[in-house]
Image (cartoon, rainbow, N blue to C red):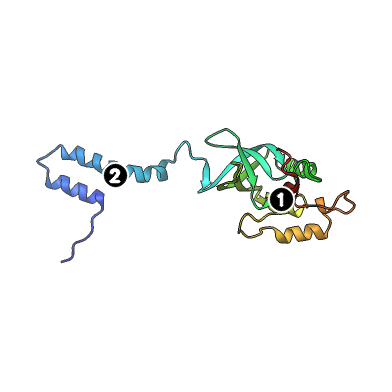
Amino acid sequence: MPQTQQTPAQAAINLIAVNHSRPWLAVALPLAFLGLFVPTQAVAWFGTDTQQHSGPNEWEGTVVRVSDGDTVAVRALKGNKKPIKVRISGIDAPEICQQGGIDSRDVLQRRIMGQRVTVQGKKQDDYGRLLAQIKHKNDDVGLWMVSQGQAWSYRYNASVNPYAAEQRKAKATGQGVFKAGQPEQPIEPRIFRRKNKSCYQ
């Protein structure tokens, strides 16, 4: 006759029943069982005070600083209260010392400064900033900045160019840095940095 599988709890109970002449087992076995069981279940039941993410790499916070059109500081609503510097993924905004740089920063500042946002990402860029997507009221902030002509769609390494369609539309309709009558032709920030280095150097 095939044996039926027992759960760890059932096995412990049966062992206690068989060894009724050893009362210490009534205490020892449940404790041993709990020692195996609690660590794997405690997080699911009770969570943890340091948990600040609603997903594997997602958390919510408040924007406390806007440095330029693609870099902000966000203070998490839970856990560590020290602001985290976030580089918005998928976009490249003009440098502050570049034509359109201040306008790009101001547009982003008006949109999300002091606002609650969702941050999703786990990688860091070469400057130690968290590289992440930011959403405000379920809107992708990076996509919005490109659609307003305030940033270029930017492909990191071999990744897909995420907002190429929005950039083409912004350019065709003369949005932001693509507005007609600019003193200089708009130049992508990566090319500007190659020629002039960063404003922060």
Outermost residue on the bottom side: it is 1
Tell me which residue sits at (25%, 50%) in the image. Answer: 8
Disc 2 secondary structure class: helix
Label 2 neighbourhood size at 10 Å, few (<14), some (14-19), many (20+)? few
Tell me which residue sits at (28%, 42%) in the image. Answer: 34
- The vertical placement of 87 against 147, above or below, is above
Tell me which residue sits at (23%, 58%) in the image. Answer: 5
Q: Position of residue 86 (x, y in %)?
A: 62, 42
Residue type at mark 2? Leu
Which quadrant would the N terminus be assigned to in this image? bottom left
Q: Would residue 53 be found to the left or right of residue 92 on screen?
A: left
Residue denoted by label 2: 36
Q: Would residue 25 be found to the left or right of residue 175 on screen?
A: left
Q: Residue 136 or 171: which is nearer the viewer?
A: 171
Disc 1 secondary structure class: helix
Q: Position of residue 168 (x, y in %)?
A: 76, 61
Residue denoted by label 1: 190
CB atoms at circles 1 and 2 under 8 Å apart? no
